[in-house]
Image (cartoon, coloured by chain):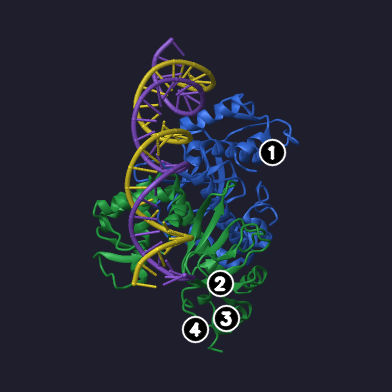
Chain colours: A green, B blue, C purple, D yellow
DNA sequence: CGGCTGATTGAATCGCCTCAAAGAGCGTGG
DNA sequence: CCACGCTCTTTGAGGCGATTCAATCAGCCG
């Protein structure tokens, strides 16, 4: 009994954290673990009923496309995040893996049924959905009003902040090095820019001594305060 | 008993529609009707605990500001919509009235308590929040990837569609005239453009014979299909 | 009638995109 | 081991679209 989901790395932080061991059985019966390769898609826009899932490891993107095929990433998902749109008949967004990822997948209908039974989980999902809405609204402001420099500086600043939480080798305010889980092109798709503009802005931040780029994926923040200032975060 | 909220014009469509008459008493005890003047603010960004409300009539905007004071409208609210962010400690957005409006206001804490008791209402709110998230994500795509012409054409198209629902004098596909509840400047704030650009695009659509602008607030859609085409909606 | 707010139109600038070429990193296969 | 092809990145040159700045115009109210 207590073995159920015992090996789950995000049990505490995920939605399931609201369930006790007996309740967890319900969920466990419905869920299936699944590994996603880098680039693999979990859910296509336009699909009849999308899946619901908890992200165990890796990073996912939620994206939409214009009629002429350009992409916009409208959300990123990190471990313990909930993924999917319950109650939405045909999903408008595509969910795919930016890195290799592991998810715990539930059929949408069954998951909805579970929500009705487990009030605490529904409550937690409601809170998270409001948080996601707030986050997306904030991103709306950034995308429409910020310059390319502000967007890139803000993005790196956020990613550094997130990396500090995950990775404890960088403590306090000292220079922190971390690997971006996104390519330049994917960063461009998040920020509503082009690859070239992202690259140019990173080069500028490096030239200003604010960043170092030791590898193609690695970033070192040498001056977090200056970075935040360039992001217009003050 | 059955008199409670009997005069509410949006009783059916709003969140309260999920409650029966006895349950409604709980809500009714907590709620207060309030009239908002055009331009008046219901809730400031940064406020300790924001209010929750149902919109009875009029149009509200949800907006954010950059550090240097430029505004971005991140959402619009129409009658029967729910307004506010339960579970969010300090609200990040300002809610104000674009037109004269009437709202049914609840203290945040009390409203949260009510959600816990009335599961159907919580469920309905969850569904609406997911819908709002989807909508906001869609807007993210538009703001970051569409041209000024696509944005303006799409906006007018959407507003015309909404007006057709409210106002039945325009039937079928014939030319439909309606009043915009927003000034040019407010449209610019929704679309992430400037007043001048919005004005120029409207002039272009008028010159192309797609729109007529009989008054400063009034719009007539002469060719809905062409409008949709310019919005990149095909 | 002036004073106000909001809308329109024009001219010039600037930021980002587009197009293009070259360089870096990396796995594969000879 | 090196050559090759592939993807991703960097850098440059030029163009276009939206902004900025500025002036005029329309509607409304005191």
Q: Residue A128, can we see it?
A: yes
Identify the residue at horizontal 42%, vertical 53% (top origin).
B92
Q: Is residue D27 above or below residue A151?
A: above
Mark 2, Cα crowd under 10 Å, few <14 / some 14-19 / many 20+, is some
| Discs 3, 4 touching: Cβ within 8 Å | no
Q: Nearer the observer, disc 4 or disc 2?
A: 4
| Discs 2, 3 touching: Cβ within 8 Å | no
Q: Helix, strand or loop at disc 4?
A: loop
Q: Nearer the observer, disc 3 or disc 4?
A: 4
| Discs 1, 4 touching: Cβ within 8 Å | no
Q: Nearer the observer, disc 1 or disc 4?
A: 4
Q: State the CA–CA distance, disc 2 to disc 3.
A: 11 Å
Q: Helix, strand or loop at disc 1?
A: helix
Dot 4: chain letter: A
Find disc 1 in the rendering and name its residue. B164
Q: Helix, strand or loop at disc 3?
A: helix
Q: Could you tell me residue C27's position as x and y percent?
A: 45, 70
Q: Could you tell me residue A126's position as x and y percent?
A: 54, 64
| Discs 1, 2 touching: Cβ within 8 Å | no
User: Which dot marks residue A7?
Assistant: 4
Find disc 3 in the rendering and name its residue. A24
Give the left or right position of residue B120, taking residue B72 as reference: right
Q: Nearer the observer, disc 2 or disc 3?
A: 3
Find disc 2 in the rendering and name its residue. A121
Q: Could you tell me residue D2's position as x and y percent?
A: 35, 67
In this view, the residue in front, A32 or C16, is: C16
Q: State whether discs 1 and 2 lie on one chain.
A: no
Mark found first going from the N terminus, 3 or 4: 4
Q: Could you tell me residue B174's position as x and y percent?
A: 73, 32
Give the left or right position of residue B191, taking residue A85 as reference: left
Mark 3, Cα crowd under 10 Å, few <14 / some 14-19 / many 20+, is some
């Amino acid at each position: 009994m207590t073995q159920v989901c015992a090996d789950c790395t995000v049990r505490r932080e995920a939605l399931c954290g609201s369930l006790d061991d007996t309740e967890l059985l319900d969920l466990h019966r419905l869920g299936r673990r699944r590994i996603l390769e880098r680039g693999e898609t979990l859910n296509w826009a336009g699909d009849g009923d999308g899946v619901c899932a908890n992200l165990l490891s890796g990073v996912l993107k939620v994206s939409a496309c214009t009629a002429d095929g350009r992409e916009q990433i409208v959300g990123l998902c990190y471990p313990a995040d909930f993924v999917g749109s319950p109650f939405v008949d045909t999903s408008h967004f595509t969910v795919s893996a930016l890195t290799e990822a592991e998810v715990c997948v539930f059929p949408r209908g069954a998951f909805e049924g579970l929500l009705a039974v487990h009030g605490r989980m529904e409550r937690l999902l409601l809170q998270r959905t409001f948080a996601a809405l707030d986050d997306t609204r904030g991103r709306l402001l950034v995308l429409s009003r910020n310059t390319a420099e502000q967007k890139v500086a803000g993005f790196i600043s956020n990613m550094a902040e997130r990396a500090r939480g995950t990775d404890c080798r960088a403590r306090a305010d000292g220079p922190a090095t971390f690997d971006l889980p996104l390519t330049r092109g994917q960063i461009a798709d998040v920020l509503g820019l082009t690859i070239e503009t992202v690259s140019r802005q990173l080069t500028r931040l490096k030239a200003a001594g604010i960043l170092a780029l030791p590898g193609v994926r690695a970033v070192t923040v040498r001056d977090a305060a200056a970075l935040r200032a360039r992001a217009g975060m003050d």
